[in-house]
Image (cartoon, rainbow, N blue to C red):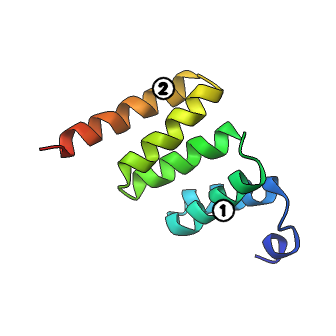
Amino acid sequence: QPLLESETDKPSVHLLAGRAYFHSAQLRRAEEAFTRVLELDPTDHYARFILGRTLQRLGRFVEALAQMRMASAMNPVPEYLEAINEVKARIALREP
């Protein structure tokens, strides 16, 4: 926390914190950290992807899909494409 407060303009610090929050299931904090990374560096495809994963775990599938699609457009790696398909399938299950 002190590092986050002293290094408010460093995307790497917020990304590291976000990953720690994500892996410890502190998903709201993770969302805030990844959002801050993207405020500082909108081109960070990994931050977009992991924000999408965070939103997915929060059950916010449409928002997750948007972030994952942007990440994939920036860097079309298989992991991103697989995640997009997972989220699309979850959205399809929820539609009437």
Q: Decide which of tag 2 and tag 1 comes sooner along the chain.
A: 1
In three-dimensional space, the C-alpha distance between marks 2 and 1, rounded to whole angstroms, equals 23 Å
Q: Which amino acid does label 2 sit on?
A: Leu
Quadrant where the C terminus is found in the figure: top left
- Label 1: how many Cα within 10 Å (few below 14, some 14–19, many 20+): many
| Residue 44, above or below 40 | above
Q: How many marks?
A: 2
* Camera-nearest residue between 71 and 30: 71
Return the mark for residue 33: 1
Relative side of 89 to 54, left or right: left
Mark 2 sits on what residue? 81
Which residue sits at x=51%, y=64%?
Answer: 27
Task: Report if the CB atoms under discs 2 and 1 are less than 8 Å apart.
Answer: no
Which residue sits at x=56%, y=50%?
Answer: 51
Element carrying mark 1:
helix
How far from the left and from the top, in percent, is residue 52? 51, 46
